[in-house]
Amino acid sequence: IMDVMDLIGGFIPDLDKSISIMLTNGEPTLSQELIDIVRTLKNNSFSDITLQTNGRRLSHMDYCIELIKAGITSFSISIHGSNYKIHEALTRTRGSFQQTFSGIENLLKLKKLFPYLKIFTTTTVNKINVNDIKNLMKLFIDERPLINTMVLNPVALRGNALLHSKNLAISYTSIFESVNRSLLELGIGKTEKLVITDLPQCINSFYSGP
């Protein structure tokens, strides 16, 4: 079986070094080779490297620093509620909210030392958390301006989400209405710090993301 590092080394020479790299699929921080992978990418002139993660391991400050020094320039943190009840109802992992939230707070502290660092929060919007959007906006747009972007992803009905579609499925219109209501109540107004992925332009083009 080919070693992961050997596999990456085989691809690197053929890649455009100006492209953005996103490390994702499963939970990358579970890999013991993650730091070496990031360092290899950085040493081969890749300057835009994003880590997509549930953020739980980022609750350890030393690990955050190690990732940044290795070459991570952006973090995309999945968080699905403004409190543990909502978040853990979706992750089904006790203690995951506190770990993820601590990870975000650690990155915000480090951004003061590494100002180039970009921090994104990503939330999969569904029937369980759609009414929590206002609280998430308060946390990640209003109260924490150092966060670059808050991303909302409408739930994709596949895998376990399809099996539980009755409890999760929600319309684009419901998401859009909740977003607009939340912005109005918080007095934020439309902002480029908020993106909704896969939102049809027939509903609204301002928030639409790739």
Image: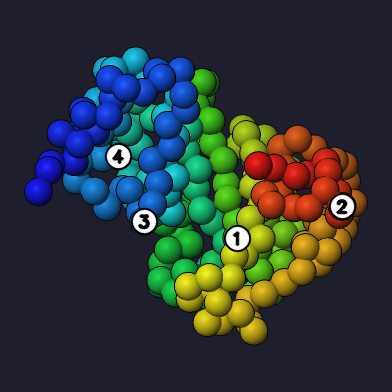
Between disc 1 and disc 4, whose residue precedes?
4
Question: Distance of mark 1 from mark 4, alpha carbons?
Answer: 26 Å
Question: Distance of mark 4 from mark 3, alpha carbons?
Answer: 19 Å
Dot 1: few (<14), some (14–19), or many (≥20) neighbours within 10 Å?
some
Could you say whether the residue bearing mark 4 is in a helix, strand or loop? helix
Disc on res. 22: none
Across and down, in percent, residue 10 comes to: 21, 29
Residue 97 is left or right of residue 83, and the answer is left
Question: Distance of mark 2 from mark 1, alpha carbons?
Answer: 21 Å
Disc on res. 124: 1
Q: Name the residue under label 4.
A: 63
Could you say whether the residue bearing mark 1 is in a helix, strand or loop? strand
Across and down, in percent, residue 164 comes to: 56, 82
Residue in the picture at 54% in, 56% down: 79
Q: Amino acid type of disc 2?
A: Cys
Between disc 2 and disc 1, whose residue precedes?
1
Residue 40 is left or right of residue 206, and the answer is left
Across and down, in percent, residue 127 comes to: 69, 74
Q: Amino acid type of disc 4?
A: Tyr
